[in-house]
Amino acid sequence: MAATITEDNRRKLGRINKNFFLHIHAGKVHPNSLRPDYTFGLGIILGFLFLIMILTGVILLINYTPSVERAYNSVKDIMFVVPGGRYIRNIHRWAAHGMVLVSFLHLIRVFYTGGYLKGRSQNWIFGVVILFLVMFMNFSGYLLPWDQLAFWAVTIGSNIAASFRELTDILGITQVLDIGGFIRSLLLGDDTVGQAALSRFFMLHVVFLPVTLMVFVGLHFWRIRKDGGISRPQSEGAKVNKLYSWPLVMWAELAILMGTAAVLLAMAFLFDAPLREEANPAFAENPAKSPWYFLGIQELVSYSAFAGGVVIPVLFLVFLISVPYVDREEKYIGIWFSGPQGRRITWQSIAFTGIVTLALVIIIIRYGWLNTWIPGIPRFVVMLVNPATLSALAYVLWSLWVNRQTGSGRMRTMAMFTCTMTAFIIFTVIGIWFRGPNWEFYWSAAQWPVF
Amino acid sequence: MTVTDINESGQTRRDFIKRFSVWAAASAGILASLSLIRQFIPRFSRQQKRFKIGRKNNYPLNSYTYLPERQLFVYRDHEGVRAVSAVCTHLGCIIEKSDEGFQCPCHGSCYNEDGEVVSGAATKDLPWFELNKDVDGQIVVDQGRIAGPGQKLYI
């Protein structure tokens, strides 16, 4: 049916198409794409957060000096001397944390609504790359203030990369082929964290990663248009009339931008970004904790550096990339959890993960692990058998079982995804609230011993 | 089609030149980036591997002394001096002296007095370094040479 294009409609299309910054939008959108209970606007929030990061980052660059002698003091100047510097730094900090949080929420939203189906697999993979880039952006920005937190987080992080040595040591080829040491020297430019590392991380954080991120964000948006708008619930019955983007979508996006900015400004006003003592290679903080989003991984590496820091995260990444290929059922797009069966599987998976992972964690905290039970046990046994690898194995078995019960690719993928996400949350919560000095278990920080 | 030269496999001259130039450009690019990658690999370390740590009298008897700027524990008894690394072999934090040996604050790896792993996620023992006496009487630590836990500099 050819709806006659009135002068008014032509004007609405023109408002979008004739503006460089707006022509990223389609002229018309499907009404279901705008349902807030479907997308929660998470992607657009991320876009705005990234813009805010760039703006505040440029402002911070004016007064920051990337040298070992000056870095800490220049950040101190930003905090205490530069007018409004503290506020800008706080916004930068909370926007960065927001990006990690919202990236994960966006991942979860897209997964459970089947947003990776029907030719959207390529965009799903771009999304996974963006998630990785956001995490790496945060990690590289972490070193720049050159305080104790920064120094030890990056020391630990670079040594996680170097823990390939645990594998090459077992094979006895570290002398010839030291992959771990090679990756670390690429990251740090030296054996330990120093000026070379600061220069490299500065370059990564300020030039390489933001530009790469912009490219992938561009690709991500481009694919949305190519795939016919964001994935959405199929509408029942007859053809629906699409809505004109102008001014409807503009209002929606403006509201989200205002909301995001309001939350950020309030956070930055109420909570200061931390700045500890200047980096001191002679003494580690006790406990030396990474930012909250890495504490799940820090909990895993406390079992085994290589298994928890390299193998599990790489397997997780491989799983995420494989999602559109493991689940090829082009059904239930836009339906949360694909209906009641998926909802049930999700709850069961959460319960299963809760029981298995918590049981393993309780065992290692209360009774120790193989190396405390059997002194002199070969250390690679602990590397292979620890709460991290055992729970990962349990999730694989669980999703295989779900596959046998339901015979559905969607259900097995959903079981696996739910398990890994739940475990990620469990380990992160333990790392944030239940680990104290010497990485020992405490019910609360009030019980920490005083030195 | 003006090009008529076709070889046995049905390839035109133009096809050949096209394919040849793509491969030439690709291999030139790969070789150039390989040589550029070398810029990312550090050629030297700012860390000193061999250094003096003073005379034995600087170190009290039968106790571990921590050298903050070198990240070393030096132990002296009535026979001589030994030096053990203070860097945790798990993920590189600085270990602390505990009652039974050493303990890492970051992820809780424990070592005994000989630097051997007792518990935790560390997979390697703490390295003990070779010590020598210089002509001026100072002790020289050589972090490039690993000694056993029992090896002392008898002075």
Image (tube, coloured by chain):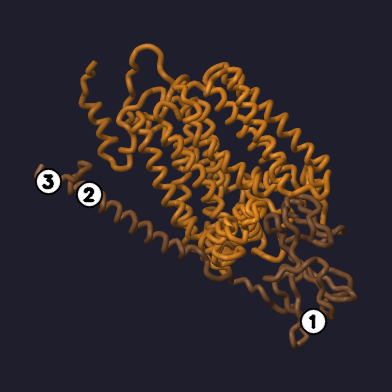
Q: Is residue A138 above or below residue A253?
A: below
Using a 10 Å C-alpha cutoff, classify the residue at mark 3 as few (fewer than 14 neighbours), some (14 to 19) or many (20 or more). Answer: few
Looking at the rendered image, the disc whose residue lies closer to the viewer, 1 or 2, is 2
Q: Is residue A393 above or below residue A177?
A: above
**Residue closer to the observer: B5 or B43:** B5
Disc 3 marks which residue?
Answer: B3
Residue B141 marker: none
Q: Nearer the viewer, residue A26 or B141?
A: B141
| Residue A404 percent location from the top left of the image | 60, 20
Q: Chain of mark 2?
A: B
* Residue B55, numbered circle: 1
Q: What distance separates the C-alpha of mark 3 from that of mark 1?
A: 86 Å
Across and down, in percent, residue A114 comes to: 48, 26
Rendering coords of residue A224 (x, y %): 38, 33
Location of the C terminus of chain A (image quadrant): bottom right
Say which chain is brown: B
The kind of residue on which mark 1 rests is Arg
Read off the residue under disc 2.
B16
Q: Is residue B141 visible?
A: yes
Residue that sits furthest to the front in the current view: B8
Q: Have a look at marks 1 and 2 and say if they share a chain.
A: yes
Q: Secondary structure at mark 1?
A: loop
Report which colour depicts chain A: orange
User: Which label's residue is closer to the chain start, 3 or 2?
Assistant: 3
Q: Marks 3 and 2, how far apart in space?
A: 12 Å
Looking at marks 1 and 2 on the same chain, the residue that comes earlier in the sequence is marked by: 2
Circle 2 Cα neighbour tier, 10 Å, few/some/many (<14 / 14–19 / ≥20): few
Do tag 3 and tag 1 residues touch (Cβ < 8 Å)?
no
Spatial CA distance of label 1 from label 2 is 75 Å
Q: Amino acid at mark 2?
A: Phe
Direction bottom: furthest residue:
B136
